[in-house]
């Protein structure tokens, strides 16, 4: 069978096309983000039975975890906004919204909106680190729900 | 003619952002009467292979050099600020109905090793178009 030509490549997509908001997309987006990523995973229990080599899975739920790194700014406003300046037990969770746009310029429009409900920092890595380096805070986080529109 | 369209876009952008006349070609440097203004010269077009599975060559990068000649040092300093502002705002463009990423290399004083009078106060940079 002859090889068909693949569709034209859509070049140019990078982190400059993303905006991250705390609370709502009407707020000022975060401006100090170094990295942001998430992992969504299905948790399931499994069963095997005698005389059958197949594994049977029962899905129990979906977990959302990820990493966030923020460059230190003149103030720690953004660390505070995401709930990552100081951790305390039973902090009020945030809503974090990540929006992917069709272009990096302001002429771009939203393509995908990912809403992380009950966004909560679970671990902080921060400090001046080393001489002549730029300071940043590294967070591990979890959310109870990821909705994409 | 994508390359022509890219150079046309840069010419129009230079006219509006830098407020100078712009020509598609470099001046003849051995002549004494090089007018102040901007000059555009195509430099290189490079293909990027292996960006994805299923096809070999998908992306192109076109490099165009931009030379801006001013009348004196103070005007050159102001022009460097305008070039900076241009690089900050012009990060992408739609050229020939296609999105193109625009990146600026270092803005430098133009090399004037042959001591041409008109090149005493001139800045140069390379503009990269990724498509």
Image: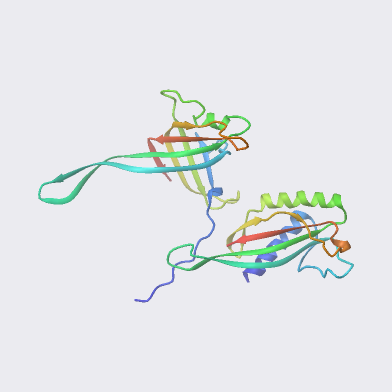
- Viewed as shown, does residue A98 lie left or right of B121? left
- Position above or below: B68 against A90: below
- Viewed as shown, does residue A10 lie left or right of B30? left
Kindly indicate the quadrant of the structure image that contains residue A40.
top left
Q: Position of residue A97 (x, y in %)?
A: 48, 39
Nearer to me, B110 or A3: B110
Q: How many numbered dots are placed on residues in this image? A: 0
Quadrant in the picture for the N terminus of chain A: bottom left
Q: Position of residue B41 (x, y in %)?
A: 72, 67
Nearer to me, B125 or A81: B125
**Which residue does the image show at 88% across and 54% down from the upper left?**
B72
Nearer to me, B22 or A52: A52
Q: Residue reaching furthest left? A: A51
- Viewed as shown, does residue B29 lie left or right of B94? right
Q: Position of residue B74 (x, y in %)?
A: 86, 49
Q: Residue reaching furthest front? A: A131
């Amino acid at each position: 069978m002859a090889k068909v030509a693949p569709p034209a490549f859509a070049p140019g997509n990078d982190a400059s096309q993303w905006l991250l908001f705390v609370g709502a997309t009407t707020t000022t987006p975060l401006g100090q983000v170094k990295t942001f990523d998430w992992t969504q995973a299905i948790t399931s229990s499994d069963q095997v039975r005698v005389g059958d080599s197949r594994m049977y899975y029962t899905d129990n739920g979906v977990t959302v975890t990820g990493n966030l790194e923020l460059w230190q700014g003149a103030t720690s406003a953004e660390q505070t906004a995401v709930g990552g300046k100081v951790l305390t037990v039973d902090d009020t969770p945030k809503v974090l919204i990540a929006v992917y746009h069709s272009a990096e310029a302001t002429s771009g429009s939203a393509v995908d909106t990912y809403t992380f409900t009950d966004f909560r920092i679970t671990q902080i890595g921060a400090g001046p680190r080393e001489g002549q380096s730029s300071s940043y805070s590294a967070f591990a986080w979890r959310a109870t729900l990821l909705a994409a529109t | 003619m994508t390359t022509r369209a890219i150079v046309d876009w840069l010419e129009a952008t230079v006219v509006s952002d830098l407020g100078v006349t712009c020509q598609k070609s470099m001046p003849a440097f051995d002549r004494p009467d090089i007018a102040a203004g901007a000059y555009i010269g195509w430099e290189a077009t490079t293909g990027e292979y292996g960006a994805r599975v299923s096809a070999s060559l998908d992306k192109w990068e076109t490099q165009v050099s931009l030379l801006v000649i001013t009348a004196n040092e103070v005007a050159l300093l102001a022009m460097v600020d305008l070039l900076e502002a241009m690089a900050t705002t012009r990060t992408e463009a739609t050229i020939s109905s296609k999105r193109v990423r625009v990146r600026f290399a270092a803005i430098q004083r133009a090399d004037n090793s042959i001591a041409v009078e008109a090149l005493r106060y001139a800045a140069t940079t390379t503009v990269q178009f990724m498509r």
